Image (cartoon, rainbow, N blue to C red):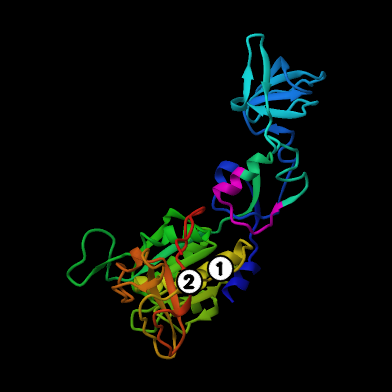
Amino acid sequence: MAYAAGRSAAAARVEVPLADADGHTLAEPLVARTDLPAFPTSSVDGWAVRGPAPWRVVGRVLAGAGAPSLATDGTAMEIATGAMVPAGTEEIVRIEDSRRNGDGLVTGVARPVRDWREPGEEATRGEELLPAGTPVTPGVVGLAASCGYDTLPVRRVPDTAVLIFGDELLTAGPPGAGRVRDALGPQLPGWLGRLGATVANTAVLGPVEDTLEAHVLAIRGALAGGADLVCTTGGTMHGPVDHLHPALRELGAEYLVNTVAVRPGFPMLLARFPEGQFLAGLPGNPQSAVVALLSLVAPLLAGWHRRAKPALAEVVVGGPIRSRGGDTHLALVRIDVADGRAHPVAHLGSSMLRGLATAVGFAVVPPGTPAEPGDRLSLVPLPLLSGERPCW
């Protein structure tokens, strides 16, 4: 549902400079604008030669310059790595496999494998290199540059606002006297950035006062400020100070998802406003909020960017993980470098962050079935920075 909702959004195509493209998503296929390489290119420093040895040196070819032809047998040109191979070249003799005598003549033996790259060896002009929907990493940026691109067509990154609900929250200093430190406002922009959204410094607001009027005003203000997605924290239940559901009704939102049979994080929600913007209601407990972020926001943003649905990895369990009754249990795990297996982290409470700080993701434990060492489970990975590689 969340993925389909994201795909239904009108995510505009924009053109961005290569320097700004990392972290975006290709809106069109990346197509080779020329053969790669575009001309025959020397792979080594050495001599481009024609005919049998010895060879008389008739010139030099350096990278970045055109190459005159080798027109006569018994001639050679000194050539640098990356330089254009002169027309008429029959072989390239590596510098370390050659000798130049006192008369200036060069002798040597070329290796069996040709030491230059032919045009189109890596790609041919017009060939599709990457499909639309590919996340742009530094490697993709480099490939695009090698093809001659100066800009890339990408999906517009959705603007996101984060609203922190809860009178009990502090935004600075240590907790105490019945109040706790807000741990979601500082971390959500980082997670959202990894998932493909952007949060301006001014778009994290809170704590929002625990009244219905304050909730409505905060959400309305975020929408009026241009947010495509509003992420709220707390207030997703129906307690005496939980005002999110009444605020959504007042603002005319429709529920796409309202609670999920998963622990922690079950009172999560995803709603859509009449103008097409989205609101993701994340529970107030930090670990529950991250579960909701991966369960609802990650697929929503993947759909927005027309990326493939977020894929689940598979891990082998290294220690017992309890079940959570009739609900799916998402259990934080770390990968032990000694055995390569997924072990449950300590400090698993939904309000705790110590385990989250060292985890690679959440192992998916089916309802009513505890996991034992050796079992294979799906893994919901924590989002990575563009270009990072998972450790499992």
Q: Is residue 140 magenta?
A: yes
Amino acid, disc 1: Pro
* Residue 370 seen by the camera: yes
Can you give x and y, in whole percent of width and height, for residue 28 in the image? 70, 54
**C-alpha separation, residue under disc 1 versus residue under disc 2:** 9 Å
* Residue designated by label 2: 380
Can you give x and y, in whole percent of width and height, for residue 330 in the image? 42, 77
Q: Is residue 165 magenta?
A: no
* Range shown magenta: 129-142
Q: Residues within 10 Å of mark 1 (few under 14, many from 20)?
A: some
* Residue designated by label 1: 310
Q: Quadrant of residue 169?
A: bottom left
Q: Is residue 263 above or below residue 139?
A: below
Lateral position of residue 81 relative to residue 208, left or right: right
Pointers 1 and 2 in contact (C-beta within 8 Å)? yes
Tell me what residue is drawn at x 23 percent, y 70 percent.
179
Q: Give the SS element for disc 1.
A: loop
